[in-house]
Amino acid sequence: MGVSAFPTQPKVLPPADWQFTPLTETVHSTPRWFTGTDGKVHLVYEPLLTNGLASRVTITAIEVRNADSGAIFINLAGPPLFGAMSLPTSLDTPAVVLPPGTVGVVWLDVPLADQAQVPAFVAHRLMIDAVDGVPASFLSFTGAQHVVVDQRPPVVLGLPLAG
């Protein structure tokens, strides 16, 4: 028996800075900012989190950070996180549990003190509950994507009628 019908392949290792993550994130619409009636600048956008595991994943916290400085703008956990997430198939129903192979939407409204705080890039730190077969080091991770923030001033609409 000693000869295999299949040739052995050389072992390929990922780059040193590579990290496996149980969730992948994408942002389809560029984060945009505006000044709200509360006088604060708000950064709004919707990251999509895809569960690539064969087990359900419970997201326990999401931090939005300035990708350059690492400063934390917002940390959502508990009820605020539950209220900010849903599945695309039921947008009105909060959900932090992603079944296998599904996508969750995080509806972000990140308050900033002023326009000077609008970052060039944001990054997300994600925390999940323990999942069978997933090493503990993967339960808290920073997404690989640094998301570009639109720096242009928002469009200001005037009154529709004069007089």
Image (cartoon, rainbow, N blue to C red):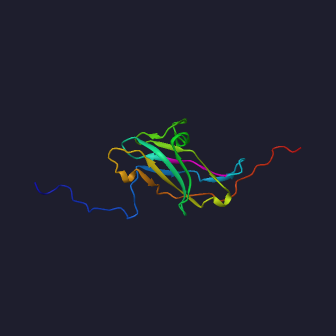
Quick one: 86 or 26, which is closer to the camera? 86
- The reply to whether the magenta stretch includes residue 139 is no
Residue 145: x %, y % from top left: 49, 57
The N terminus: image quadrant: bottom left
Residue 78 place in picture, x, y as percent:
51, 42
Left or right of residue 115: residue 59? left
Residue positioned most to the left: 1
- Relative height, residue 42 to residue 98 (above, below): below
Residue, far right: 163
21 sits to left or right of 40 = left
Between 150 and 97, which is closer to the camera in this rendering?
Answer: 97
Camera-nearest residue between 9 and 142: 142
Point 40% across, 47% down: residue? 52
Q: Which secondary structure type mostly characterizes the magenta part of the structure?
A: strand
Residue 43 belongs to the span the image colors magenta? yes
Residue 55 quadrant: top left
Q: Position of residue 46 (x, y in %)?
A: 56, 47
Q: Quadrant of the C terminus?
A: top right
> Residue at coordinates 55% horizontally, 63% vertically from top-left?
69
Quadrant in the rendering for residue 149: bottom right
Instruction: Give percent across and percent down for residue 146.
Output: 52, 59
- In the image, 138 versus 28, the foreground residue is 138
Report the magenta residues as a range. Answer: 41-48
The quadrant holding residue 12 is bottom left
Image position of 138 with respect to 14: above or below: above
Q: Residue at x 49, y 43 (%)?
A: 104
Looking at the image, how many numbered discs can be counted on the residues?
A: 0
